[in-house]
Amino acid sequence: MRRPGWFLSAIAAGLYIFLYAPIVVIIVFSFNAARFGTVWEGFTTKWYGALLHDSAALSATKNTLLLALVSTGIATLLGSLLAFGLTRFDFPGRKIFDRVLYVPVFVPDIVLATSLLLFYSLVGSFIPALELGMTTMILGHVTFQISFVAIVVRARLAGLDPALEEAARDLGAGEWKTFLHVTLPLMLPGVLAGAMLAFTLSLDDFIVSFFTSGPGSTTLPILIYSSVKRGLTPDINALATLIILISVLATVSLTWLQKNKQDPHPKK
Amino acid sequence: MPEKRQMHLGQQLTRAGRWSRAGITSGPAALWLGIFLALPLAAILAISFLTRGEYGGVELPFTFDSYKRLAGFGELGFDSLYPVVLGRSLALGMATAVLCLAAALPLAFFIARLSEKYKGAALTLVVIPFWTNLLIRTYAWQILFSPNRWLTVAAHSLGIGTAGEALYPGTLAVLTGMVCDFLPFMVLPLYASVEKMDWTLAEAAADLGADRWRVFRHALLPQIWPGLGAGFILVFLPATGQFVIPDLLGGAKTAMLGNVIQQQFASSRDWPFGSAIAAVALLLVLVGLAIFQRKGSKHEVLP
Amino acid sequence: MQGERHLEPQKCSVPLAVEVVSLLRQFGSVVALSGVSLEIRKGEFFSLLGPSGCGKTTLLRVIAGLDLPDGGLIRISGRDAAEIPAHRRPVNTVFQSYALFPHLTVSDNIAFGLRMKKIAAAEIVDRVQRVLALMQITELATRKPAQLSGGQKQRVALARALVNEPEVLLLDEPLGALDLQLRRQLQVELHQLQRKLGITFIMVTHDQEEALVMSDRIAVMNGGKIEQLGSAREIYERPRTRFVAQFIGQCNLFKADVRPANNGDILARTELGEFSVSNVSKDPTRPGSFMAIRPEKIQLLGGATCGMKNSFAARIEGFTYCGAETRYRLLAGQQTVNVVVMNREASAVFQPGETVQCLLPAEHLILLDA
């Protein structure tokens, strides 16, 4: 195959710049001394220091991580089980379920968020636990995470040689032992990829959190949004830079890990 | 040999055995999605037919008023506001998908033509923005598009925007943010099919005297069609229902479905009308997805 | 044609490893097994041979317990196996794809079955070592399956099954994924291994040569039925049906009307004349509407030797020189006849266009069902 020519390379370079311009500008402006707006007033690192004393940012970080960890845990368990069930057992309605799985992926966040808000306020008067707050946010996040986990894990399971599980049976493993010693270890990379995806989706989510949060359960995206809306962004830039840095590190190390494990099932 | 077995991995399962296993594995997730996805969506559908209560709640009777209003027939005669929003959402979604496609095609070909050593890195570079927060990347365009930034000045010199003013809010800003955010969704599936492509077909076509366009049209395009379809649906549907990007980079003049829904639930507290718009947005996505799955089932484009 | 008819007569004397009676298996409208019956003796190398879709793999899977029959009986070592789930059957399988667990090392793969049976750790180590040595793969013990070649994987798959000392070893196209040279080598090794261990082997294959070379007995399957069951020699020399005759080796077929002759032989009337057939099996009721002969059994005689018994004249259409033999394509009337002649002498090659006499020895003629 031919190597890319100068024309194609120039277009690609332009597109990479386009993709990274927003990220670079945030990083640059996190070192901007200006308190308001978007004018450059000199280099400083004070905003990073300020973050450490910003109780709102700290509690939002705590909330974001708590929300992401708990919801990812639940969604990974439910989604992986679902994927296993969908690929291993035939039951009435399985084909339909297979397709419905894509609905939460494509339902606009705003529709999911408002429908959950409506649902919580309708049911909330009967069930006090559904008062808007961390619980309702976790419930909402799990709802959109399940499908992503299930789709990723299902792809992994569908790629497995069915003879592997049969071989386990043939060698004397019962149903449970086959799952434990063969299926589970083999689907684990898919489960991890699904969990990573779910975790990132939760960290990134603004809309569902925004609509289903209550007082005291502000997350980082909500904090960033309201700061941007009010135009108070200096330490938000620093915060965003840290978030970007963590995302980049996570992506690169995961890609590297997967490459070295020679996993034939890259996550999408 | 056909493999429609009545058993599971060397174990004879009665119908009850099969169903109970299906229930244990798929049941919890099904139940969860039933309660927290299906029920709320059903609720939104039901509420869209109710009347707005005096203090923001909902009341009977059942009515189609919300949908009439959405179609432009409000209490005060014809009002094009909401049909325009609907049309704008579709148009912006389509424009985003087309622009992403135009950008992703050369990028996918570029990456596919790199040597194995650099392919992974080039692809990871596309994926990284996709893993970073959308809100942050969108807000960054506010900085880039603010007055006196060199990008803004350059645009002004080309006759875009008004000198001394920011480039946002505006359609151009929204579109820029959208393309920047959704580009990875187009590049990934497109690259997947470009990577698998049989280049000898292109060589054969060129050998037979086809010009560049014909080589692309007849030898290459059919091979990347599945990836193209997947990318298009992955961009068009979410773009149409976007909320954050038009909210941060657009204004009232670029409001999309998502913004109007948010308005109805937040400031206006008109739940029936907000629900009606949400129901329409949902319908749009379901129809799009159904059409796509029908075509996609032949090509297996979704994972 | 149902299976019972083909059951070989030697009952009782040899203990049976596997006994299958009127096995039925259907996948929707596709019949994979339609009433298959057979008996496999302890310690024999038995092959299920047939084209893809003939039901051979289904039969193997049913014996392994990985598939359930819709009807019929299976006995393994005399015990009814219908109620024994796959993981408790005293059989082990070598899968076509080998199905080595990719997350386990070679020795962990081999130890898997023993661990499932909760055998003491020390004994596991000992038995794994022995089977590694037996298969000559001791140096691969710590590798993962991804680091093995096709032939090595095959050995590990065999070792993983054999370490459990099964009563019956099932092999599903065990050499199918290997290249020709390696396949030939492993055919011999596998055969010797089976002789050494004395374990009953049941092998599924679509490769007739493989089946002929390795097996004590072969069941030729087609369309969910057993067409013929017998030793390699029986199957090749005395095929009973057109399918068997044509699936295994090459065969010339002639439409024929059959009637008994005075000397106990049978006379077959074909378009090319009447042929006497000796050595017909003891089943005189069989109609036999085809006469068949293997290409290498036909003798070609040059010159005009008309009037010879069991012969006809044919014109050489063409030939292929294959080193050890020459393959001739002849035309006799409307019928194409294939003849293989060993190249014993450097000369005496018939040329295209030449007319020769084809002699069909009575003892090599076969009568087949339609």
Image (tube, coloured by chain):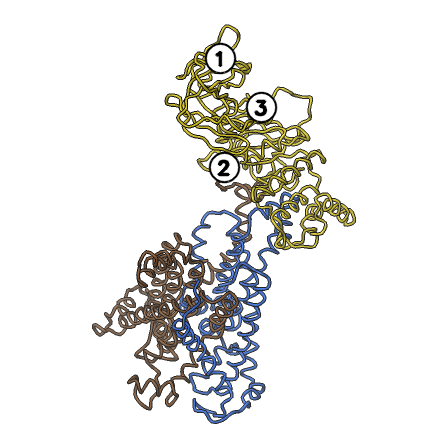
- In the rendered image, which residue does mark 3 sit on? C234
Q: Which label sits on residue B281?
A: none
Q: Along the polypeptide, which appears first: circle 2 or circle 3?
A: 2
Q: Which label sits on residue C276?
A: 1
- In the rendered image, which residue does mark 2 sit on? C52
Relative horizontal placement of residue C59, taking residue B188 as reference (left or right) = right
Q: Along the polypeptide, which appears first: circle 1 or circle 3?
A: 3
Relative horizontal placement of residue B221, taking residue C117 as reference (left or right) = left
Visible residue check, residue A112: no
Q: Amino acid at mark 1?
A: Ser
| Mark pair 1, 3: CA separation | 21 Å
Are there few (<14), some (14-19), or many (20+) residues within 10 Å of tag 3? some
* Position of residue C10 measured from the top left corner of the image (x, y, whole percent): 64, 20
Q: Nearer the viewer, residue C274 or B17?
A: C274
Residue B220 lies, with reference to residue B132, above or below; the image says above
Residue at mark 1: chain: C
Q: Nearer the viewer, residue B80 or B100?
A: B100
Visible residue check, residue C20: yes
Instruction: Kindly identify the residue that appears in the image at 54 percent across and 45 percent down.
Output: B18
* Position of residue C349 measured from the top left corner of the image (x, y, whole percent): 48, 27
For discs 2 and 1, the disc positioned in front in the rendered view? 1
Relative horizontal placement of residue C338, taking residue B147 as reference (left or right) = right
Residue furthest to the right: C122
Q: Secondary structure at mark 2?
A: loop
Residue at mark 3: chain: C
Task: Indicate the chain coloured blue by its letter.
Answer: A
Q: Amino acid at mark 3?
A: Glu
For discs 2 and 3, the disc positioned in front in the rendered view? 3
For discs 1 and 3, the disc positioned in front in the rendered view? 1
Residue furthest to the bottom: A41
Residue at mark 2: chain: C
| Mark pair 2, 1: CA separation | 36 Å
